[in-house]
Image: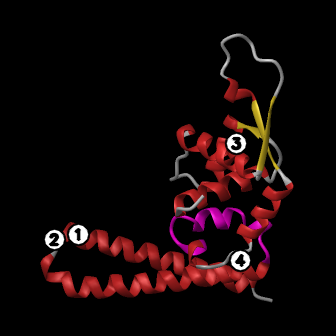
């Protein structure tokens, strides 16, 4: 799995299976819960990822009993982490670089903080905070430069964005303070 989206999906699947085996529908439900309310996960993305993770050796699957005639076989396939899959999940949870605090991966990483070492959590939170502080500075500079050229609705949207980023920076500061010994 190479792209950022595939890496996020891989982590979501492995993280969802860390709580025990599941069939496709249950696995999708767990992964969506980890990814957050604003993210969706189609079966068209899930099943190819499951096939790939199984072929790599991170997952194993088996049929959950005899299928009635005409039943969808995917609904009965149960997936579980292999030892290599558990090791891969541990490796992914130990990564605290820029990919961990980017918009795509950050909510998932926070959802998996219960299985993440404290020093890695702090690094991810600090990285996210720094990234958002940069974003806030750029947003403020843009608002000053473009104030005369934008209509009132664009200005309101910019102010809303600024407030949202400020709120997240405060939240991150509180989490970092709680995490430090």
- Quadrant, the C terminus: bottom right
The furthest residue to the top: 69
- Residue denoted by label 3: 27
> Which contiguous range is marked in magenta?
100-117
Q: Report the residue at 78% width, 36% height from top.
A: 78
**Any mark on residue 121, and which?**
4
- Residue denoted by label 1: 154
Q: Report the residue at 35% width, 85% height from top.
A: 138
**Decide: marks 2, 4 in contact (CB < 8 A)?**
no
Q: Residues within 10 Å of mark 3 (few under 14, many from 20)?
A: many
> Which residue occupies the foreground of this view, 84 or 166?
84
Dot 4 or dot 3: first in sequence order is 3
Which mark is in front, 3 or 2?
Answer: 3
Marks 3/2: CA–CA distance: 46 Å
Which element is circle 1 on? helix
Q: Report the residue at 59% width, 64% height from top.
A: 107
Q: Position of residue 34 (x, y in %)?
A: 65, 55
- Quadrant, the N terminus: bottom right
Residue 121, by quadrant, is: bottom right
Dot 2 or dot 4: first in sequence order is 4
Marks 4/3: CA–CA distance: 25 Å
């Amino acid at each position: 799995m190479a792209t950022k989206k595939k890496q996020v999906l891989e982590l979501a699947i492995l993280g969802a299976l860390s709580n025990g085996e599941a069939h496709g529908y249950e696995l999708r439900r767990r992964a969506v819960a980890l990814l957050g309310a604003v993210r969706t996960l189609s079966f068209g993305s899930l099943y190819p990822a499951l096939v790939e993770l199984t072929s790599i050796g991170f997952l194993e699957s088996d049929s959950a009993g005899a299928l009635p005639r005409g039943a969808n076989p995917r609904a009965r396939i149960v997936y579980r982490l292999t030892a290599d899959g558990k090791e891969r999940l541990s490796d992914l949870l130990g990564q605290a670089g820029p990919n961990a605090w980017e918009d795509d991966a950050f909510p998932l990483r926070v959802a998996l903080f219960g299985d993440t070492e404290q020093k890695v959590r702090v690094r991810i939170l600090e990285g996210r905070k720094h990234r958002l502080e940069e974003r806030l500075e750029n947003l403020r500079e843009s608002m000053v430069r473009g104030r005369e050229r934008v209509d009132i609705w664009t200005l309101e949207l910019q102010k809303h964005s600024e407030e949202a980023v400020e709120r997240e920076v405060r939240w991150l500061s509180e989490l970092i303070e709680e995490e430090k010994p």
